[in-house]
Image (cartoon, rainbow, N blue to C red):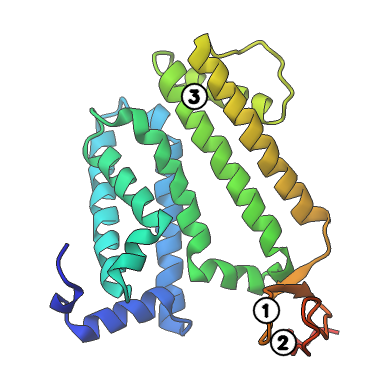
């Protein structure tokens, strides 16, 4: 990969401000990217219903070009190539780009495209929107819900690809989603099962991971609300909303609020 010194410094600074800044221009830019992400995710979810249409490959390669351009822009905006490559979303985008560029050879990995939902949650504007909607204290709940939602559709895509791909696209995808939800919730109606040892192993992993994510979501809903504020003394990140002292070290905290009574 080329050295980042080849990019003009003002361009890198402008991209970094747009991607990570909090001014009006940056927020508008990030919001536009989030809307594009949502449109791309909609295309991915509708993929089983669109794959036989002539326009499918056109949209497929257009999205591939967009993701490639954004990968280059994010890399040039990042202050460290090593840290950029250490980001999970970087590799998710690379895998997604591969499935878009070579759909005939990598269709078995197309279910990984749903992981782009995480890209939406990682946009700085996402947390800003939660704050403006009065959901700042529910960030953990929203994050846990997104993790569960992504897992459901990742497993659905995986099950559809390896077990229901030869069926009618509409029926096959719905059957895969139905199986996934029934398995994750441990309802287990038994009217749809996955054949063979590989199917049993898939069901086991789905149940174990799925119920863990359900428990995490339930914990986020019922546990007392906390805020993210690093303690200056010991670094503890999570505190009660009305905390005055750090529970770990007793240091006096000065947690900012929104002025609400």
Number of other residues with Cα within 10 Å of mark 2, as a class: few under 14, some 14 to 19, many 20 or more: few
Sequence-wise, the earlier of marks 3 and 1 is 3
Q: Do the residues labelled 1 and 2 touch (CB within 8 Å)?
A: yes
Between the C-alphas of marks 3 and 1, the distance is 41 Å
Where's the N terminus, which quadrant? bottom left
Q: Callout 2: helix, strand or loop?
A: loop
Q: Measuring from the top left, give residue 189's x and y in whole percent.
A: 72, 15
Residue 237 vs residue 41, the one in the foreground: 237
Q: Residue at x 42, y 78 (%)?
A: 26
Q: Residue 131 lies in what quarter of the image?
A: bottom right
Q: Is residue 260 above or below residue 199?
A: below
Q: Residue 159 carries which label?
A: 3
Number of other residues with Cα within 10 Å of mark 3, as a class: few under 14, some 14 to 19, many 20 or more: many
Q: Residue 229 carries which label?
A: 1
Between the C-alphas of marks 2 and 3, the distance is 46 Å
Examine the rendering and report whether any part of residue 73 can be seen: yes
Sequence-wise, the earlier of marks 2 and 3 is 3
- Total numbered badges shown on the rendered structure: 3
Q: Is residue 50 left or right of residue 141?
A: left
Q: Callout 3: helix, strand or loop?
A: helix
Q: Residue 224 lies in what quarter of the image?
A: bottom right
* Residue where numbered disc 2 is placed: 256
Between the C-alphas of marks 1 and 2, the distance is 9 Å
């Amino acid at each position: 990969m080329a050295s980042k010194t080849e990019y003009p410094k003002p361009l890198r600074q402008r991209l970094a401000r747009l991607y990570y800044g909090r001014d009006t221009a940056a927020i508008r830019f990030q919001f536009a990217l989030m809307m594009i992400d949502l449109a791309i995710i909609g295309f991915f979810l509708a993929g089983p219903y669109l794959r036989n249409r002539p326009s499918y490959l056109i949209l497929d390669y257009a999205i591939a070009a967009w993701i490639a351009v954004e990968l280059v822009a994010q890399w040039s905006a990042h202050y460290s190539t090593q840290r950029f490559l250490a980001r999970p979303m970087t590799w998710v985008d690379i895998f997604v780009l591969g499935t878009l560029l070579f759909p005939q050879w990598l269709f078995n990995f197309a279910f990984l495209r749903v992981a782009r939902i995480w890209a939406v949650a990682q946009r700085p504007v996402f947390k800003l929107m939660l704050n403006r909607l009065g959901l700042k204290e529910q960030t953990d709940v929203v994050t846990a819900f997104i993790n569960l939602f992504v897992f459901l559709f990742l497993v659905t895509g995986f099950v559809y690809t390896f077990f229901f791909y030869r069926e009618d696209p509409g029926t096959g995808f719905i059957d895969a989603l139905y199986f996934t939800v029934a398995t994750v919730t441990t309802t287990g109606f038994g009217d749809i099962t996955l054949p063979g040892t590989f199917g049993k192993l898939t069901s086991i992993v789905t149940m174990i991971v799925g119920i863990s994510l359900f428990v995490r979501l339930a914990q986020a809903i019922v546990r007392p609300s906390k805020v993210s504020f690093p303690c200056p003394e010991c670094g503890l990140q999570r505190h009660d909303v009305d905390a005055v002292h750090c529970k770990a070290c007793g240091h006096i905290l000065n947690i900012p609020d929104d002025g609400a009574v």
